[in-house]
Amino acid sequence: MGDVVSTHLDEGRRQHIAERTGKVLGEFCRCYKEQFGVALFNSVRYEIEGNGGPQAQLLHRKVPLEDHVIYSGNLFHYIEENKKWRNRFCVVPHNYGLVLYENKLAYERDLPPRVLINSAGYKILTSVDQYLELVNSSLPGVTPKLGQTPIFKCPTDFPLILWHPYARHYYFCVMTGKEQEKWRAVFQDCVRHCNNGISEDSKVEAPAFTDAVRMYRQSKEQYGTWDMLCGNETQVLSNLVMEELLPELRNAIGPRLKGKAQERQRTWIQISDAVYRMVYEQTNAQYDAVMAKCEQERSQMESTIRTDMDQIITSKEHLASKIRAFVLPKAEVCVRNHVQPYISSILEALMTPTSQGFAEVREVFFKEVTDMNMNIVNEGGLEKLVEYMEKLSHLAFHPVKMQSCYEKMDQLKLEGLQQRFDVTSTSVFKQRAQIHMRQQMDDAVYTFETLLHQELGKLQGKDDLCKSIQRILERVLKKYDYDSSTVRKKFFREALLQITIPFLLKKLAPTCKGELAKFQELIFEDFASFILVENTYEEVVLQSVMKDIMQAVKEAAVQRKHNLYRDSMVMHNSDPNLHLLGEGMPIDWGDEHSAQAEGEPQADRRRRAKQVVSVIQDDEGVLPYAVGAEALLQPGSPQPPELEEPPPSSPDGVEEIQKALAKESHGDAGEVEERLRNGTDAKRESGATEEVAVAAPVPGDVPSQGPAGDGDRVHCATAASPAPGAEAVSGAGDAAAASAVPGDEGPSGVEAQLAAPASPVPGAESPSGASVQLAAPASPVLASPLPGADIPSAASVQHTTPASPKPRADVPPEAKLPHGTPAPLGTQAPPAPEAKTPSPSTGSVCHQPSDKETGEEVAVTPPQPPSTTESGEGVQTEF
């Protein structure tokens, strides 16, 4: 921490921050203990009554991304402490943490990473002006004059900035607009996943926590949605404390800041980050303590619930009847005058972009499978099927291919409704819908995989294979149409409740809130831990508006433009045999169906698994990043050995980077050929790039190392697209991995011999088949569940994101963070028994140490060897 920050955060100020934080956490912990008993009662009651049974739906993959990396590539990272730009190799593991290494060689050597970032709560900005606008608003009264130097100077026109209202900011830049779009999609995927960090596997702790957060904020007269309910529990509580603490600190410290406007802004960002770290550490300890105390009392409470279940239910119903008689008339008038006229408008605003997004998911899945089928006709062989299926299995987690689906939700605008109903931000609705899209895509892909895997033993030849793929595709699409309709209807109901209930509670508070205390005497003392007047009151308010919401969604279901199937159409669109297939681990197509893999030694399998680096990879930008740094070596300086020492450091200043980029752009006029690390030859021409699918090579297929010859060809696994005359898609990274996207130019000399099958028309009735009644699949609530809602709470819902390490585990100071699946703070990586790359230990979590750039000690990873440690830089860990 810098001297300036230490000056403003002296011992007295630190003590005040600790006391203020303790007071906020004390109030929250009281709310949590109350909600814990209520959540435990609801969980036991649902278990006894048998609610929430299995539902007929697309198959769900349990571990979709184990031992995989989402993305890897180079970008420039700005070091604030020495105001230098450094070339960094960024890896996004399966837990969606951002991990920055010194370079690619450091990653391959298992050296400790430079920076670990948990992106929960961050916003991705692609413009310096957008960033400066947010910075100016964070410290009122401090605005730089025109012409003054900004906080940082970007060497290219394509910045990527991670902005957080409380924590430190991160500055990156790339060299092309296409690279910027790819990295933006990857960063947004990381933010979307990390924001959904509260584990939904728990049936008690998760709903108790979210209800406690909501009750605490309502006690402070904050009823609307909260866009900082992101990250794990400790991060959410830290945001809760900072929401109250930061304005007070701004008023006390802001006027005392010295220097130019930019220096004062930079100092304030550092102070806010330092306070956030202090709050995080205190919050982590205090929340652990209250969790442990509740866990100690859990067995006794559960025993009481099971013994007196009937009496508790009777007591609660008696209390609800009294509150209903008092509140319901007022609530119904409020609903009729202030909510009912706007429900249809809210629903229409939600339905249009959401339905478009799910329709895009369907189209992307349909095109990927169709292109695969066409290429199997052209190329043939089971090995090609294996290659395509390995790519298809990760389609839902391909940030670039899924971006067209996610972008549909960006059109969501509530306009005047947002202000009327106190919706501070629509991001919570956008992200929840996007998570549903990703889950439905993965479920559809996994169902297709499972059905095809089941059929392979019955096939006689290539023609039978193509026909089976087409038949299975139509079967899965039919099921997707119904399941996605069910998911959307539940999403709409949840969103409407999320918007209207806080508004109603705020409207009714002046006339009803003060009268609730008199109902406390109706609760027996022995049952006071399981029945709360506040929760029962909210259930009554919810009942007052639920009928209108259900009616509005039901009426919208008959509108063909939104493709929402009616419940009566379930027998036409369900597949009663899917549940018989069961659910389990992902299918290993390479091991089961590759001819070379039959006698493959275990060591070669591990090596092959390591060679499949990323779900998506591409080569655009490798030359300027890698060669540009080497071009800055002094004349006559020896070329660094490939394996003996790391490559030279990247340029420091903006001018040096710009000169290097200009030099490379003028000097790189011919063709450049590069050997991909997985054994695939890539041929890249100036001004034209293409995505090459990464397939795990097998022994005997890996060509010898060395520069590619003139006669080498691109072994491209992309599907031939039926759309002629389109340009190839470019990318950036180590090895390209992506199947063809709409508009790609297919391989030359290859003709499509199989016409694209007609896609089932959305909303059209299919021929009647086996009749079975499908229950609506569970779906998590948008931000915090409401008690008594017809919608299940977040705890009872299947997690929509891939299996992620357990939040809030601690890492011992001496623990080493391997490069394979590095875990940011708040995550824990599962062990990978067959992967060559070691995974973090089960308790691997980073605390909140800073790096040597800020002068703090680092207890997360061992210090980097002197040969790879730069002056003024160290390991920095973000939570």
Image: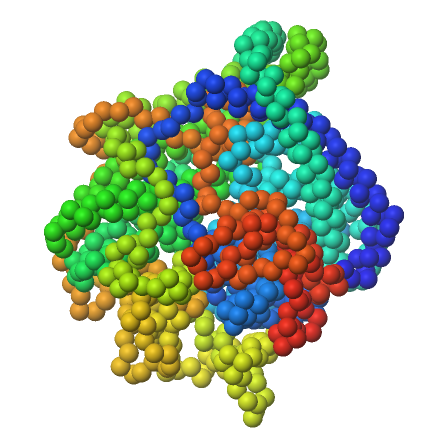
| Residue 594 location (% of width, % of height) | 26, 59
| Residue 434 location (% of width, % of height) | 44, 43
Q: Is residue 824 left or right of residue 556?
A: right
Asked whether 503 or 45 is in front, the reply is 45
1 is higher (above) or lower (below) than 676: above
The colour style of the image is rainbow
- Residue for point 53% across, 47% down: 805
- Residue for point 40% across, 48% down: 64
Quadrant assignment, res 511:
top right
395 is higher (above) or lower (below) than 531: below
Q: Is residue 726 visible?
A: no
| Residue 723 location (% of width, % of height) | 23, 58
Quadrant assignment, res 708:
bottom left
Which quarter of the rendering shows the N terminus?
Answer: bottom right
Asked whether 299 or 547 is in front, the reply is 299
Asked whether 163 or 532 is in front, the reply is 532
| Residue 578 location (% of width, % of height) | 28, 35
Quadrant assignment, res 855:
bottom right
Q: How many labels, in total?
A: 0
